[in-house]
Amino acid sequence: MRNAAIGAVLAILLIGGLFAAVHFGGTHTLKGSPSATAPKNSTGALSPADVSQIKPSFIGTIRIGDWTLVCGTPRKLPTPPGGPSEQASKAAGQPTPPPNSPLKRMAGPAPNSAAGAPGPQANSENVKLGAPPPNFMIPRCRATLYLPVPGEPKETFRVNFRLFGFRRLLAVFMQVPQETEPGDAIQMETSTKTIPIPVRGCNPKNCLVAQSFKIAETPPIETTRKLTFVFAPAGDGKPRVVNASAYGLPETLATIRRIDK
């Protein structure tokens, strides 16, 4: 029961934070540096070959190739609100989000659960995540890339890769305009595999597209040199394709695993 409550709190914090970032994100202050002498290219990005110079204590924002690594301050797992009786009553279902939480406006399931599957303690493949290990720290880093919205070149949508849950499963989260709806899927094409990423829910301005992956499913993502997102066909019946750069993505994900181990 306690594990279910903890997992639900994690899901609320993560989803709420992703939606809030639409309005408050985008600018970060660099609080740490991988190295005073880390070589960078002409765009100011760190060369993917030099990511080993980023320290595990890194806090801040830095570009690696075409991707951006963002690492917040370390945080411990929040304590579930209320006493044992309140936690026990909430364990039968999902805890009620705060009044202004983005979850109030979402119709889909949590990003690491499939429809009809267990709640936040299982991933999209119904793999139970178990209890938190001792001294568990919430994963604090993400790899971010902004891409043009199909048909709307002046608008962008954001792709985030990060580790999620007690087992540090890789997950992808995207905020896309409300041209999709829960039940749709965006196809993510890597060098070796095409992976459907389902739309989980929407607020008045954006939809959350999210999926977590079992450990055996991550190599095609963590080693890819190609990344393409294919949206459902528009009114003309043609799929909408967005070609993304994978330059720096494998190295950024490896850095995240080293920091959020």
Image (tube, rainbow, N blue to C red):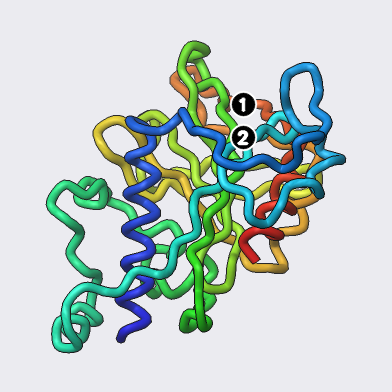
Which residue occupies the extreme top position in the image?
154
User: Residue at point 30% right, 74% down?
Assistant: 79
Q: Of the two numbered discs 2 and 1 on the same chain, state the one appearing first in sequence.
A: 2
Q: Position of residue 249 (x, y in %)?
A: 72, 41
Q: Spatial distance from mark 2 to mark 1, Cα to Cα? A: 6 Å
Note whether residue 154 is visible: yes
User: Residue at point 48% right, 11% down?
Assistant: 154
Residue count near mark 1 (Cα–Cα under 10 Å), binned few <14, some 14–19, many ≥20: some
| Closer to the camera in the image, 181 or 34 | 34
Q: Give the labeled residue for mark 1.
A: 241
Seen in the image, is 200 located left or right of residue 150? left
Q: Give the labeled residue for mark 2.
A: 229
| Closer to the camera in the image, 42 or 116 | 42
Q: Position of residue 176 (x, y in %)?
A: 43, 33
Mark 1 element type: strand
User: Residue at point 56% right, 28% down?
Assistant: 146
| Closer to the camera in the image, 164 or 24 | 24
